[in-house]
Image (tube, rainbow, N blue to C red):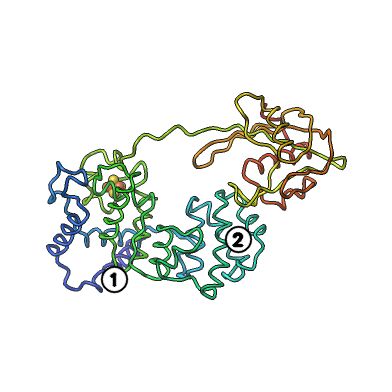
Amino acid sequence: MNAEDFMTAEMTVLSRFLEGKPNRDLETTQLVSCELLRSVGMDSINCGINTLQNDSLALPVAEVQYALSAWFEINKREMPWRITRNPYHIWLSEIILQQTRVEQGIPYFMRLTTRFPTVESLSDADLDEVLQLWEGLGYYSRARNLHKAAKMIVEKWSGLIPSALDDLLSIPGVGPYTAAAISSIAFGHPHAVLDGNVIRVLSRIFAFPEDVALSSSKQTLHKMASALLDVRRPGDHNESMMELGALVCTPKPDCPICPVRSFCKGFETGTPTQFPVKRAKKKTPHYHIAVGVIRDEEGRIFIQKRSLDSMLGGLWEFPGGKNESTESYQQTCRREILEETGMSVDVGPLIASIPHAYSHFKITLHAYDCELTSSTIPSTALSWEWAVNEQLQEYAFPKANRLLINMLTQQESGTTEGNND
Ligand code: SF4
């Protein structure tokens, strides 16, 4: 951005800022901020800040809003959902971004809005197609809820995304954060968002001393976010807080370039990374899963569909399951296949061991070549298919299963360099 662009952006922000507050007065804004801090208990023992005086925490709200707004105007990243206020696009983008980075989410957003340009078209779609378009994004309950929600929006609101917070909260997959984001960004309603980025920014600006995982802390931080909210442009304000957390106030903050540095109590302490305060995390569990690649006489591979009410419900998978500590992976593979499908197999060589991390646990998927020793007609699997390798691309699989399919494809075409034994 050259100097002229910079000036233009600054003037735009300044004129917008002055629009809603022609008689801006710093003393007034500081008083407002002191009221805010009192209202959220920042001068009380309840909040845990009994060593700091209220005055030292006073924050000039309007100054912070202006600094954020000016910074955001110049530094915000281009995203396809930022060129519109279309509530359907905002909703879709917020669902995608719940557990996905922006760069990873953009192609999925483009793909979904191209295939389903309206809520109605999403509502009419087959769930399998939605899951297939979602494949690779993970957290598949988001896709199932999206589909369910589209049907609800068509039935209840004739295909129009509602703007009221309570209505939004009744939609599957929409929690307090997403409802506030849609309501403020798409409709301009004054609701503050509180996601991980905002929690990090606020806890540093206020040097918030409590464990942010506590629900009482979240309530206090939400009150702070609400009191800081620029009600004249709540959507932009919310986005600027989140963007600051994503680009500057990251886990390793770049304080020298931060627009709110001069207001930041965390920066004043000299060690802003001590915030947000978090208690020690429990060790992430690690599960070993053994699965079988079973082929029939025609070389087709057996796959089954996970039940809708299970984790990764509606996706396809190779049969198998979790290893018990008393058995080998081969024994797990044989037992699980028998339990799930009624088929007996001889477990052959290991094809690959594939590690994968979910949000709360890790797995290693051990895949074995298996030979059928009993009927080829599964008796207990919910829904199943025999599919040739190329057809496997047409089904939606969880990540580790998809990696296994890619390995099988490479092996078939002779491009693999061996397995992960
Ligand atoms: Fe975060 Fe540093 Fe900015 Fe404070 S000054 S908000 S710690 S980047």
Residue 143: give x, y in percent of width and height. Answer: 57, 56
**Where, by quadrant of the figure, is residue 357 drawn?**
top right
Confirm or deny contact between disc 2 and disc 1 (CB under 8 A). no
Residue at the spot of label 2: 111
Residue 256 seen in the current view:
no
Towards the viewer: 277 or 101: 277
Tell me which label, 2 or 1, sits earlier in the chain: 1
- The amino acid marked with disc number 2 is Arg
> Which residue sits at x=58%, y=65%?
113
Q: In the image, is residue 226 above or below residue 49?
A: below
> Which residue sits at x=34%, y=36%?
279
Q: How many marks?
A: 2
**Where, by quadrant of the figure, is residue 146 drawn?**
bottom right
Q: In the image, is residue 97 above or below residue 414?
A: below
Element at label 2: helix
Element at label 1: helix
User: How packed is label 1: few (under 14 Cα within 10 Å), some, or many (20 or more)?
Assistant: some
**Where, by quadrant of the figure, is residue 339 drawn?**
top right
The residues tagged by marks 2 and 1 sit, at their Cα atoms, a distance apart of 35 Å
Towards the viewer: 22 or 168: 168
Residue 352: give x, y in percent of width and height. Answer: 68, 32
**Left or right of residue 277, residue 185 in this image:** right
User: How packed is label 2: few (under 14 Cα within 10 Å), some, or many (20 or more)?
Assistant: few
Residue 378: give x, y in percent of width and height. Answer: 79, 43
Q: Quadrant of the C terminus?
A: top right
Give me the disc on residue 16: 1
Q: Quadrant of the N terminus?
A: bottom left
Give me the disc on residue 134: none
Q: Confirm if mark 1 falls within 8 A of ligand 1.
A: no
